[in-house]
Image: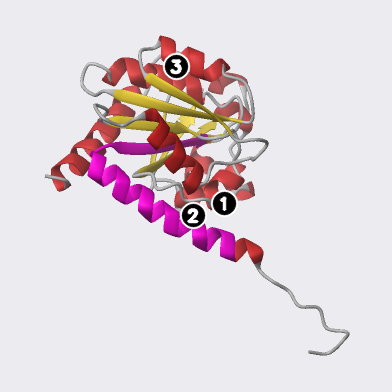
């Protein structure tokens, strides 16, 4: 090696490779426990917690539900979700802007999955880092709220490439904002032709029947495959 050469080590690649291995361990663990895990991702303030509360209320008579609330600090969202009737565990990431597979595995073990059917991971509010780390979830769900703007798929393409289901949230305030839903859908389809895109309002319930139908269908397919 020349004295003037700099040896470059791609640490990020190694980190992601190790994370992917752990994500497969998480998937095996979930399969063994017969628990369906949803990784819910969105920006801060996009409506993740409000969406979770309405979803829990719609499904809690059918499934036993747990929620892992990931945040840099505080337990505000955890208390809100717990009051909706779900089993909740708070995960503090210690300043990290995302959850990884190892953190998720630790949270699942601490939660104790016995008796649960469905678990949501409410990931840290961020459209960048959470998209890069596979946590071992069965499905990835993203909320893009109307106030954020229709161009977010152009600015943060990876999030929309890896997502299985996209909610265009806060659709009830669309008349107040300059949000081009058709353009947004096209941006998303160009990145991910197979993605489900549904406009919803966690406040009014608009579009929630489609979200609940999709989620229920995915859970039942998972359960059938495990039999």
Please say which color scheme the image uses. secondary structure
Is the residue under label 2 in contact with that under label 1 (CB below 8 Å)?
yes
- Is residue 31 shown above or below 68? below
Q: Is residue 26 magenta?
A: yes
Q: Residue furthest left?
A: 227
Q: Is-magenta flag for residue 165?
A: no
* N-term-proximal mark, 3 vs 1: 3
Image quarter where the N terminus lies is bottom right
- Comparing labels 3 and 1, the label whose residue is closer to the camera: 3
- Residue 81, label in figure: 3
Residue ranking furthest to the top: 83
Q: Which is nearer the N-term, disc 3 or disc 2?
A: 3
Label 1, label 2: how many angstroms apart (C-alpha)?
A: 7 Å
The rendered magenta stretch, by its main secondary structure, is classed as: helix
Residue displayed at 60% across by 46% down: 129
Is residue 148 visible in the rendered image? The answer is: yes
The region drawn magenta spans 14-41
- Secondary structure, mark 1, is helix
**Residue toward you, 172 or 116:** 116
Where is residue 24 drawn, in percent x and y?
A: 37, 55
Residue 101 is labelled as none
Q: Which residue is mark 2?
A: 191
Asked if the residue at tag 2 contacts the one at tag 3, i.e. Cβ–Cβ closer than 8 Å, the answer is no
Say left or right for 16 vs 117. right
The secondary element bearing badge 2 is classed as helix
Residue tagged 1: 157
Q: Are the residues flagged by discs 3 and 1 in contact, CB closer than 8 Å?
A: no
Between the C-alphas of marks 3 and 1, the distance is 29 Å
Q: Give me the residue at 44% from left, 46% from top.
A: 163
- Dot 3: few (<14), some (14–19), or many (≥20) neighbours within 10 Å? many
Residue 183 placed where, x, y %? 53, 42
């Amino acid at each position: 090696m020349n004295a003037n050469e700099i040896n470059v080590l791609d640490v990020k690649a190694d980190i992601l490779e190790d994370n992917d291995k752990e994500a497969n361990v998480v998937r095996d663990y979930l399969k063994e426990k017969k628990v369906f895990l949803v990784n819910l991702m969105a920006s801060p303030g996009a409506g993740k917690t409000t969406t979770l509360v309405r979803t829990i209320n719609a499904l809690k008579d059918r499934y036993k539900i747990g929620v892992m609330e990931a945040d840099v600090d505080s337990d505000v969202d955890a208390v809100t979700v717990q009051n909706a009737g779900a089993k909740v565990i708070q995960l503090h990431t210690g300043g990290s802007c995302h959850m990884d597979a190892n953190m998720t595995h630790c949270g699942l073990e601490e939660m104790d999955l016995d008796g649960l059917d469905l678990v949501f991971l409410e990931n840290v509010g961020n459209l960048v880092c959470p998209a890069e780390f596979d946590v071992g979830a069965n499905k990835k769900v993203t909320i893009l709220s109307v106030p954020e703007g229709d161009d977010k798929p152009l600015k943060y393409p990876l999030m929309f490439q890896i997502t299985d289901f996209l909610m265009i949230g806060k659709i009830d305030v669309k008349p107040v904002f300059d949000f081009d839903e058709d353009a947004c859908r096209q941006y998303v389809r160009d990145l991910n032709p197979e993605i489900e895109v549904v406009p919803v309002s966690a406040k009014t319930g608009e579009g929630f029947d489609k979200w609940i139908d999709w989620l229920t269908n995915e859970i039942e397919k998972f359960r059938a495959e495990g039999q």
